[in-house]
Amino acid sequence: MLYGQVELHNVEELVEVGGRPGKLMQRVPESVRSGLLELGSEQIRRAASIEIRFAAESGEAAVTIASYGGSSRVQLYYGDYWIEESEVGAEPTTIVIKQPVPGFQFDPPWQGQVPRPSFGAIWRLVVHGFEVHLLDITGAGLRPPEAYEKPALTYLAYGTSITFGLSAATPDLSYVGQAAWRLGLDAVNLGMPGSAYCEPAITEHIAGRNDWDIASLCVSVNMLNGGVSVEEFEEKAGMMVRRIAFVHPAKPLVCIGLFPSFADFGWTWPGRNVQASSSEYREALKGIAEGTGLGNVSYVDGRELLDDWRGLSHDLLHPGNSGMIRIGERLAQRMRPLLPGAQG
């Protein structure tokens, strides 16, 4: 969305929250959020690689933001190129953006020779973590990016905390970020920690969007751990897959089965009452994908994407950095032939 002279990527609505300055940068409209279960309505407010994008005529700008519920990580890029990283908490923080040294990106005779495969000469603040409010943006000659300064194709990802990138050290190390980087895609991250329940509100939201070219549905270890039977999972996941696929028959839709986890040993997360097995969920999702009869729907087993248990973190559920990179690498290999316009 456009906000003044900048673009807010992976932000669908700016929401006023009582007692907090500025406006919450929210990934879905409030009308969608209100239709989710309580936990989902909270988690969808968290920033998942949302971006503040702009060009600055003066080469300098200042962005003031605050993060509620915990510290959020901010990565600054100039086009495709990382510059620095910082953390933001509840105290409003102003991030000053200026040309770093050396000036290969900015000054003749080198400026025009810098390869720009995905993004043009624009500033990108990538924000990831909790509920981030935008308070102010200042700078001379600010403007939003032009179409040619951004990737031509967009990848939308829905899923759990793994999709959100909860256990990745930085936003760019999530499997969504890794797959998008390898294919030169823009990424829309709709990961919902602990709350990816294939609900009608989020299904209709994704189906109603026309700003993506390929999507993945990584569903859902949350439902497995939440005691959802395989029959109920099949019903809800099937509704989501079929609805999105039928509305967008020309767009590839990749259904990702469960990644390897403690559940494959028959173990149960403490305090949970599990009603199905990992293999039953995988077979159900595979059957859903194959049963649509549509050529745009495909299935990939999460164990094929994360093929090494060492890629998991201590809880044997969330992939660590190496696991995220491996998933992104192998997912990109699966997605590349589905998108003729992708890089690589």
Image (spheres, rainbow, N blue to C red):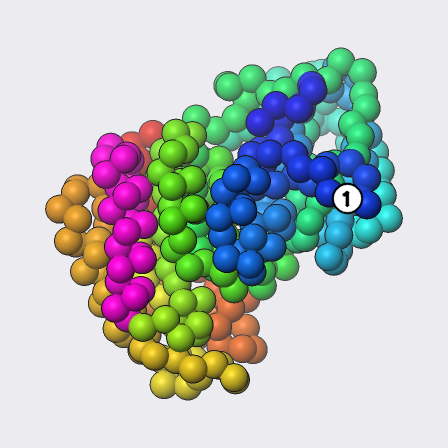
Residue 304 in view in this figure: no
Give the quadrant of the N terminus: top right
Q: Position of residue 290 (x, y in %)?
A: 16, 54
Please tell me in which quadrant of the rendered image residue 2 appears. Answer: top right
Residue 12 in view in this figure: yes
- The mark total stands at 1
Q: Position of residue 100 (x, y in %)?
A: 79, 32
Secondary structure that dominates the magenta span: helix
- Name the foreground residue: 172 vs 225: 225
Within-10-Å neighbours for mark 1: few <14, some 14–19, many 20+: few
Residue drawn at x 45%, y 67% as measured from the top left: 222
Q: Which residue is mark 1?
A: 18
The span shown in magenta is: 230-253
Residue 91 horizontal side relative to residue 313, left or right? right
Kind of residue at badge 1: Gly
Please tell me in which quadrant of the rendered image residue 135 appears. Answer: top right
Residue 254 horizontal side relative to residue 103, left or right? left
Using the image, determine if residue 145 lies above or below residue 219.
above
Secondary-structure class at tag 1: loop
- Name the foreground residue: 56 vs 27: 27
Magenta run includes residue 245: yes
Residue drawn at x 80%, y 30% as measured from the top left: 136
Residue 341 horizontal side relative to residue 144, left or right? left
Magenta run includes residue 244: yes
Residue 211 horizontal side relative to residue 11, left or right? left
Using the image, determine if residue 329 lies above or below residue 148.
below
